Image: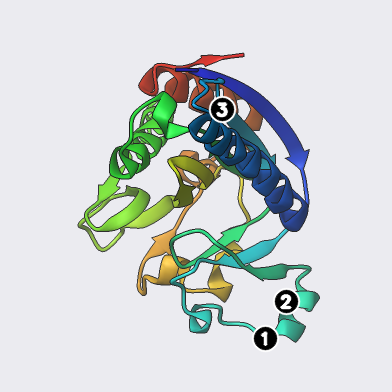
Amino acid sequence: MNRKLEIQDLGLKDYKETWEYQEELFKEIIDLKIKNRREESSLETPNHFLFVEHPHVYTLGKSGDIENLLISETKLTEIGATYYKINRGGDITYHGPGQIVGYPIIDLENFFTDIHKYLRLLEEMVILTLAEYGVKAERSKGETGVWLDVGTPFARKICAMGVRASRWVTMHGFALNVNSDLGYFDNMIPCGIKGKAVTSLNVELGKAEINMAEVKEKLLKHFLTLFEAESK
């Protein structure tokens, strides 16, 4: 079992280009698994972890409702945003500058074969990272992602998640608001959940800006620990 991770930080990159790159890595792992099965071989499957920031974009998951995007195509152009319907789970999500997006493209058979556990560990990675900044984050029952003040009128989401898995290979992942422009969230019903606010780490800490590289470092440290993995 290969528990090594190839880490890449793609910087600011177009959503569609990144999606196509994810698909390439995803297909490469699946093709190798099919080859192993067909030829009864045991070639190691690679694991990837991509960090990226996207220009303003709204994405809708397979089970999502387009009604949760509250603006027209013309308005999208006006605010410099794009829109894609994609092949992950979940509803509508926003990505933009100041948000850390992480795409683990891993073969879960190298770790464990449990999608529920995979999602819970991704949430735990974020919860532990935010705790290092003195922010108490938690899960909200029945709602994937990471939240603050769950069960109060002030409940707000700080990290969205949506994944796809086939043959135990994952793609897509999480989006953590660090220095996000929260105004862009007003154009949608986040994750299709009405009446829930969103927040960002810099807002919670009352700071203009948080060091993104430092947050990525902490996220990766917790991911490696939780998945008993190592960086390549």
* Residue on which the image places disc 2: 76
Foreground of the two, 136 or 85: 85
Residues packed near mark 3 inside 10 Å, few (<14), some (14 to 19) or many (20 plus)? many
Vertical arrangement, residue 229 with respect to residue 219, above or below: above
Vertical arrangement, residue 88 with respect to residue 218, above or below: below
Do tag 2 and tag 1 residues touch (Cβ < 8 Å)?
yes
Secondary element type, mark 2: helix
Residue 72: image tag: 1
Residue 23, how many percent across, how many down?
66, 48
Vertical arrangement, residue 57 with respect to residue 160, above or below: below
Residue type at numbered disc 1 = Ser
Foreground of the two, 184 or 19: 19
Residues packed near mark 2 inside 10 Å, few (<14), some (14 to 19) or many (20 plus)? some
Say left or right for 14 vs 138.
Answer: right
* Residue on which the image places disc 3: 47
Foreground of the two, 180 or 58: 58
Give the residue displayed 52% in from the left and 35% down from the top: 38
Residue type at numbered disc 3 = Asn
The residues tagged by marks 2 and 3 sit, at their Cα atoms, a distance apart of 35 Å
Residue type at numbered disc 2 = Leu
Residue 134, how many percent across, how many down?
38, 29
Does label 2 or label 3 sit earlier along the sequence? 3
Do tag 2 and tag 3 residues touch (Cβ < 8 Å)?
no
The residues tagged by marks 2 and 1 sit, at their Cα atoms, a distance apart of 6 Å
The residues tagged by marks 1 and 3 sit, at their Cα atoms, a distance apart of 38 Å
Give the residue displayed 63% in from the left and 35% down from the top: 50
Residue 162, how many percent across, how many down?
46, 54
